[in-house]
Image (cartoon, rainbow, N blue to C red):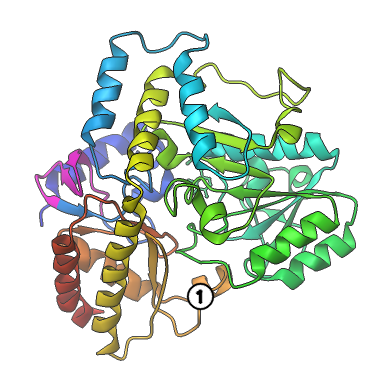
Amino acid sequence: MQYQRSSALFKAAQDVIPGGVNSPVRAFKAVGGTPIFVEHAKGAYLYDADNNKLIDYIASWGPMILGHAHEPVIEAVKSRADLGTSFGMPTALETEIAELAISMVPNIDKIRFVNSGTEACMSAVRLARGATQREKIIKFAGCYHGHSDAFLIQAGSGAVTFGSPSSPGVTRGTAKDTLLAPYNNLEAVAQLFKEYPDEIAAIIIEPVAGNMGCIPPLKGFLEGLRALCNQFDSLLIFDEVMTGFRLAKGGAQELLGIKADIVTFGKVLGGGLPVGAFAAKNEIMKHLAPEGPVYQAGTLSGNPLAMAAGLTMLQELNKDQEVFNRLDLKTARLHEGLETVLKDTDIPFQINRLGSMISLHFTEDEVIDFETAASGNNEKFNTYFHGMLNEGIYLPPSAFESYFLNDALSFEDIDFTINAFKKVVKTI
Ligand SMILES: *Cc1c(COP(=O)(O)O)cnc(C)c1O
């Protein structure tokens, strides 16, 4: 495949945008090479600036769960645009999408819409702190909750310790209120509660991690977190920005049968427009302004175009409950295909999957947390990524990302992908 135009566009972008991109992973730093500039997309396919057609396994990092340019969503946005694109005043549309979201998701009474997953998680933590009158939070190494300061904290070599900032610009003062534990390690969390029994406002977690590859929770882990939160009067925040409206109509709460106190959303909820949200029972949401004192606001929050896209997306998912089963079957087919090919080689590998989230790691170790995810062989991953790209298959350009399948993918697309992998695997 040729990438001359993408190359030229990337060069031009680098002159005026830091690194040439508006979100770092797009720059292909982890895998090397030139990022691909997209022209348009339809269904399961991306068409790039050099007229290459690519089968897409990222779906805009999740939102395009029904495929790109899904007709009803596009129509909703177009017809809404004619009525005006922003008012800074309430519209009936916001109540309509709120009612539908609340009917689909277990265990929430009220929902507040924002403009991104970052905003949703940042606001959820403020709400948790306001509601509990406590300051510390626990997060897990390798979990991503957006780029707000409190979350840009990493563990030092898997040790449970005070977090140190993982980005310049995050202050030590902020870092000291974020406690860290390894994913799937209940003992480490229990230890933190023992140390700070009255100080922890909330645990925030991706109930199925999707930002260090796909890492499902081990049996009993989320149940254990729920029990600890109950015991120490802390709140459990499920960051369902990725899993919400993807793993099931009601997200991970529904699929895994665990109740969170606050849930955050984004990605699928916006149907491809910038939307996030956080939701909880009345007794927690009543603390939020203007009902309560915890401040949160947004000029473009509840934007009519974004709400129209999101509402139509939720309506589509709500009326076709088979969609989640189909996605599961398609992803299972990919899983089996990759596994069958790899079993014929001596390449060490792990495949993690839950529903339509899947990742392939070139390591012998079971991948259950950040440390084991990081044990993957990056050289092998990069060869795999570029090999597949050359066959017209667009995978996440980093070993630390999950794939997100979309329902426009056909079984033929997946078989094509597996056949391409048979060629590529010989080069790994
Ligand atoms: C993508 C993501 C976010 C951040 O959402 P943005 O819309 O990129 O700000 C937060 N949490 C999780 C789990 C995510 O996957």
Compared with 276, 400 (above or below) is: below
Q: Is residue 271 visible?
A: no
Residue ID at (79%, 61%): 228
Q: In this rendered view, identify the residue nearer to me: 194 or 233.
A: 233
- The image shows residue 295 at horizontal and vertical percentages of 71, 23
Compared with 193, 377 (above or below) is: below
Compared with 257, 41 (above or below) is: above
Residue ID at (72%, 69%): 186
Q: Is residue 102 visible?
A: yes
- The image shows residue 177 at horizontal and vertical percentages of 78, 48
In magenta, the rendered stretch is 34-53
- Please tell me how crowded label 1 is: few (under 14), some (14-19), or many (20+) other residues with Cα within 10 Å: many
- The image shows residue 281 at horizontal and vertical percentages of 69, 37
* Image quadrant assignment for residue 37: top left
Magenta segment: does it hold 171? no
Magenta segment: does it hold 46? yes
Q: Quadrant of the C terminus?
A: bottom left
Is disc 1 placed on a helix, strand or loop?
loop
**66 horizontally vs 165: left or right:** left
Mark 1 — residue? 367
**143 horizontally vs 364: left or right:** right
Residue ID at (15%, 70%): 420
- The image shows residue 397 at horizontal and vertical percentages of 34, 58
* Image quadrant assignment for residue 171: top right
